[in-house]
Image: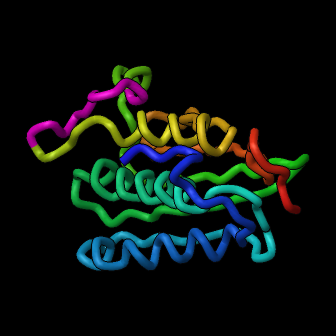
């Protein structure tokens, strides 16, 4: 499941289209919930990067929000938004679920840490997302502080043109 530059295809793509395609592929999983996922990404925001690994991160963060953020049965609202500035894009996945308890926040990036072991969780999702963000996309993945019980906000910050040691970027 791990992705790296050797197996990922790099090309120029529109971020809004890519995120929309990822969410469309998740339709079968999402249609069985009452949760709503919205996109706030300007069209025409192009990246020269790796859309497959980027899509893995978006899919995992949205899936985590659906499966972990609303264990109390309420209907959730998840927003995927992005803005570009200074040669970088900040892509956020924000939900209005119950959030991540303070005592587990520091462990979420650890491999094999899960609060859902008996429900099929492996504890590898966020660890792999962070590895992809840094090693493949040349960026960072952070948990943004939110008020206790007020949802979760993950922010992926990546360059508009991914680092590449073997070929020049095409802008």
Closest to the observer, 116 or 139: 139
Residue 76 percent across, percent down from the top left: 38, 63
Q: Which residues are magenta?
A: 108-118
Q: Position of residue 103 (x, y in %)?
A: 35, 20
Quadrant for the C terminus in the image: bottom right
* Count of numbered circles on the image: 0
Query: Between 112 and 35, which is closer to the camera in this rendering?
Result: 112
Dividing the picture into quadrants, the one containing residue 30 is bottom left
Which residue is rendered at x = 41% and y = 76% of the image? 25
The answer to whether residue 111 is above or below residue 31 is: above
Which residue is nearer to you in this view: 3 or 108? 3
Depth order, front residue of 5/166: 166
Percent x, y of residue 159: 77, 46
Residue at the spot x=58%, y=35% of the render? 142
At 22% from the left and 39% from the top, the residue drawn is 122
Q: Is residue 161 left or right of residue 64?
A: right
- Compared across the picture, whether 56 is left or right of 90 comes to left
Q: Residue at x 15, y 36 (%)?
A: 117
Question: In the rendered image, which quarter is residue 15 located in?
Answer: bottom right
Secondary structure that dominates the magenta span: loop
| In-image side of 81 versus 42 (left or right) | left
Residue 128, image x and y in percent? Answer: 43, 39
Where is residue 121, by image quadrant? top left
Query: Is 66 situated above or below 134?
Result: below
């Amino acid at each position: 499941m791990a992705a790296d530059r050797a197996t990922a295809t790099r090309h120029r793509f529109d971020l809004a289209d890519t995120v929309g395609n990822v969410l469309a592929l998740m339709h079968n999983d999402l249609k069985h919930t009452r949760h709503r996922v919205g996109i706030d990404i300007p069209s025409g925001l192009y990246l020269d990067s790796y859309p497959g690994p980027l899509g893995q991160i978006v899919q995992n963060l949205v899936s985590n929000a659906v499966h972990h953020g609303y264990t109390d049965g309420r209907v959730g609202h998840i927003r995927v938004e992005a803005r570009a500035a200074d040669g970088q894009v900040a892509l956020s996945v924000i939900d209005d679920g119950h959030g991540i308890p303070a005592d587990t926040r520091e462990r979420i990036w650890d491999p094999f840490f899960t609060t859902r072991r008996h429900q099929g969780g492996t504890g590898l999702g966020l660890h792999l997302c962070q590895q992809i963000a840094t090693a493949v996309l040349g960026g960072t993945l952070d948990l943004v502080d939110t008020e206790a019980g007020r949802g979760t906000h993950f922010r992926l910050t990546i360059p508009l043109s991914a680092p590449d040691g073997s070929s020049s970027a095409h802008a």
